[in-house]
Amino acid sequence: MTSNVSISDAAISLLKQMIAIPSTSREEQAVADFLESYMRRESSAEVHRSGNNLWMVAKGYDAARRTLLINAHIDTVKPVPSWTFQPFEATEKGDRIYGLGANDDGASLVSLMHTFLALEQEPLPYNLVFLASCEEEVSGKNGIAAALPLLPHIDVALVGEPTGMNPSVPGGVRVAIAEKGLMVMDGTAHGKSGHAARNEGINAIYLALEAIQKLRDYRFERVSDTLGPVKVTTTIIQGGTGHNVIPDSCSFVTDVRTTDTYTNQEIVDQLQQLVAPVELVPRSVRLQSSGIDAGHPLLKAILSVAPDATLFGSPTLSDQALLSCPSLKMGPGDSARSHTADEFIEKQEIRDAISLYVRILKNLHL
């Protein structure tokens, strides 16, 4: 792999082979085995594996230097029923490749892996680590969270996700410089049962609806410059046992997209106070919002290569949420194609991504 053309062709070929291997979250062993063999064959670096996470450290690692992590994930969501192509078969139509995971996150994975292969022998002024992580789509504890303690200390990360890397369009190189965090919260309203024909009991569904109305209408005071307001959306409600029984319990689930203006715990405290005495309990507070400063060397390197790049805050979650270092999200494809039927990537998007990644990393000084 000595030229950009051959690297791009190899990346595209690898993606097509990956699509043919089902790799839904927590079922990634087969694709991890395949990628491990590929990495051992193509790279001069030592290949490390823990569970279904794979990583490589470029030649010349020096603990005294700063370290850049480039990361993408190997897992996919399950295919929806409305696919018209075979989801586990790479179907080519013109410049497009259709298949589950082509856009999210296979294109970023093969592009970043081949960027690493192109640069692993280069005398870079920083350490370079490539990580292919699992369980991203479910924020699983066996994914990047399990791999990070085994890696060298990471100072900054570039996470490959479909944000758009189209240099032929003004502003078409899109970089997510911040990302919202996520909390899933379980609500429970407790009432008192009774006969629906009489004025007795306390209807837990009504109590839950009052709490949900408060959550819908509530506005957090602080608004993020890059991510906008905290977003609170109730998505599931369940209650009742029979048409003639006043329900004594009603549960609901609320999706909360957090920003850098509050910690997740601060948001929990405000929402719990808002709906009390209805219970509202987060399943986890570990998926915080993330981002990078405007003056960070990694962002400067990107802007030196793509000076008209579009910088934005992303509403969707990625492995960024589990990183404690500065990070940004940048990859080929379009987030709007993710988790949809007939997901696709264009081959030129992969070619452009590898070219841009290589130029950016060669211009980077940490």
Image: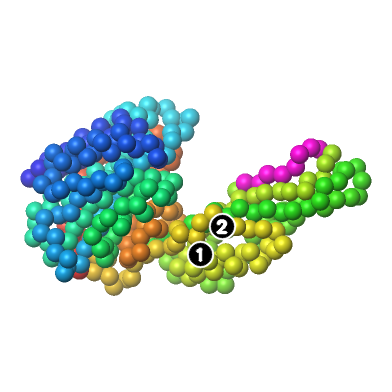
Left-right relation of 26 to 47? right
Count the numbered circles shown: 2
Asked whether 273 or 12 is in front, the reply is: 273
- Magenta stretch bounds: 236-243
Question: On the image, which quarter does residue 295 sit in?
Answer: bottom left
Q: Secondary structure at mark 2?
A: strand
**How would you rate the neighbour count of disc 1 (Cα within 10 Å): few for under 14, some for 14-19, many for 20 or more?**
many
Left-right relation of 184 to 102? right
How far across and down, in percent of the image, does residue 107 sit? 28, 43
Location of residue 297 with respect to 165 vertically, above or below: below
> Label 2 belongs to which residue?
282
Tell whether label 2 touches label 1 (CB within 8 Å).
yes
Q: Is residue 153 visible?
A: yes
Task: Give the CA separation, mark 1 to mark 2.
Answer: 10 Å
How far across and down, in percent of the image, does residue 232 sit? 57, 58
Asked whether 18 or 224 is in front, the reply is: 18
Q: For residue 241: magenta? A: yes
* Colour convention of the picture: rainbow
Q: Residue at x 92, y 46 (%)?
A: 198
Left-right relation of 1 to 349? left
Q: Is residue 229 visible?
A: no
Tell me which numbered mark, 1 or 2, is placed earlier along the sequence. 1
How far across and down, in percent of the image, does residue 25 sit? 40, 40
Q: Amino acid at mark 2?
A: Pro
> Label 1 belongs to which residue?
264
Asked whether 71 or 174 is in front, the reply is: 71
**How would you rate the neighbour count of disc 2 (Cα within 10 Å): few for under 14, some for 14-19, many for 20 or more?**
some
Q: Residue at x 18, y 54 (%)?
A: 57
Quadrant in which the N terminus appears: top left
Q: Residue at x 48, y 70 (%)?
A: 261
